[in-house]
Image (tube, rainbow, N blue to C red):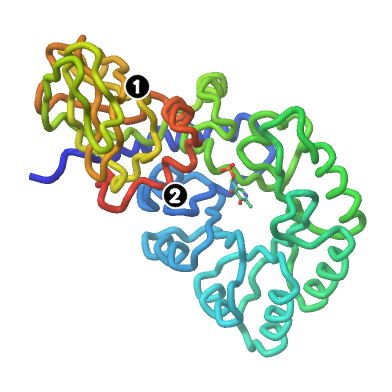
Amino acid sequence: MSRPIYAHIHTDALSHNLERIRQLVPGSKVWSVVKANAYGHGLEAALKGLSLTDGFALLDLAEAKTLREKGWTGPILLLEGLFSQEDIFMVTDLQCDCVVHDFNQIDWLEAFSEARSSNRLPNIYLKMNTGMNRLGFTPAQYREAYHRLHSAGYELTHMTHFANADYIDRTPSVDQQAELFNQSREGLAGGTSLSNSAAILWHHHVIYSDWVRPGIMLYGASPSGRYEDIQEAQLQPAMSLHSEVIGIQHLEGGQSIGYGSRYRTDVPIRIAIIACGYADGYPRHAPDGTPVWVAGADGLSSGKVCLMTGQVSMDMITVDVTDMPHVQVGSKVELWGKHLPIDKVAQAAGTIGYELLCAVAPRVRRQ
Ligand SMILES: Cc1ncc(COP(=O)(O)O)c(C=O)c1O
């Protein structure tokens, strides 16, 4: 008998969310972003649910290899490109496309192009830094980078990444970044790749690119952290994190619960001990009052939100079920998912859905 915690991955929700993206940006091809083990969902489930995508974008060659081994023959884009000169051999073996954001990578790619005999050259996504100021060539460097790769025989697509597509009042705005991008690549041949989830959701009327790069919206969580976004955009959560009650405590007024005795009772309460802790990826900093969905007498769909009471431990959390007398050992619980939006839990815990999803630990079964 294994611990009752598991992540149910709804591959039908992944397919549905991809279809919603197609409706929002019908003229664009879709790189489904599956880095970080498909935002915690597992590459196998992603491949199943997103089999109709145009390509998968990720970071690690090991993940690219897994996709190939599981039968994916379509395009794969490495979002940070080569980390070392030797990577190029695996990149070509696995037939990946490559982002280029740095002159070192251009040196390596030029050397490879000169020395190669019959290897196919990877397609290049040349990244322009239009204001995010993480990776990419400045607009002043961009033409030189483009011409060097073009002369070395590479096919190029122009790419940038938005910093503020989920804000209306921050700069650089999507419009400012897009304008700089368009000016700086004027006259240079090649397709484009711009939009992440937030740009697809909130700027699809004004921003077009040949390839979009959605991540979080595929998984049914919000780029902004507002849980209402998901309903408004008609997206579905792709992960439900389930567990069970493994103990019940009856406490008198004036007692405390868990490490540090953070929660003290004023009145008698009934506490459910749930098999889920920070070693499963649940945020240790979640405060008292963080919502947890506890099944009703007829199961999860008749359940309701109960509130966390006491510090998250490595393997357990504690929840007030005083007004749910039917709850007993074995009662089902949803930490987030179909009944409890992940963005609500993230908000209560002072984080975002991205972090919660990616943090789900390897010891949690995906099902
Ligand atoms: C370059 C790039 N494109 C697209 C994405 C997907 O972003 P999101 O998950 O916000 O859609 C990411 C994620 O960080 C990224 O780094």
Residue 101 lies in quadrant: bottom right
Disc 2 crowd rating (10 Å Cα; few below 14, some 14-19, many 20+) is: many
Q: Could you tell me which quadrant the N terminus lies in?
A: top left
Residue 38 is tagged as: 2
Q: Residue at x 76, y 54 (%)?
A: 191
Judging depth in this view, the residue of 10 and 95 nearest the camera is 10
Query: Where residue 340 appears, x then y in whole percent?
Result: 37, 23
Q: Amino acid at mark 2?
A: Ala
Q: What is the CA distance from the residue labelled 2 to the residue labelled 1?
A: 22 Å
The residue that label 1 is drawn on is: 339
Q: Residue furthest left?
A: 1
**Picture layout, residue 253 above or below residue 239:** above
**Picture layout, residue 213 above or below residue 99:** above
Query: Where residue 226 appears, x then y in whole percent?
Result: 55, 25
Q: Residue at x 26, y 16 (%)?
A: 301
Query: Where residue 88 appears, x then y in whole percent?
Result: 58, 78
Give SS at disc 2: helix
Q: Residue at x 26, y 41 (%)?
A: 313
Q: Residue at x 68, y 81 (%)?
A: 108
Query: Where residue 73 appears, x then y in whole percent?
Result: 48, 61
Disc 1 crowd rating (10 Å Cα; few below 14, some 14-19, many 20+) is: some
Relative horizontal placement of residue 364, taking residue 58 as reference (left or right): left
Disc 1 within 8 angstroms of ligand 1 (CB): no
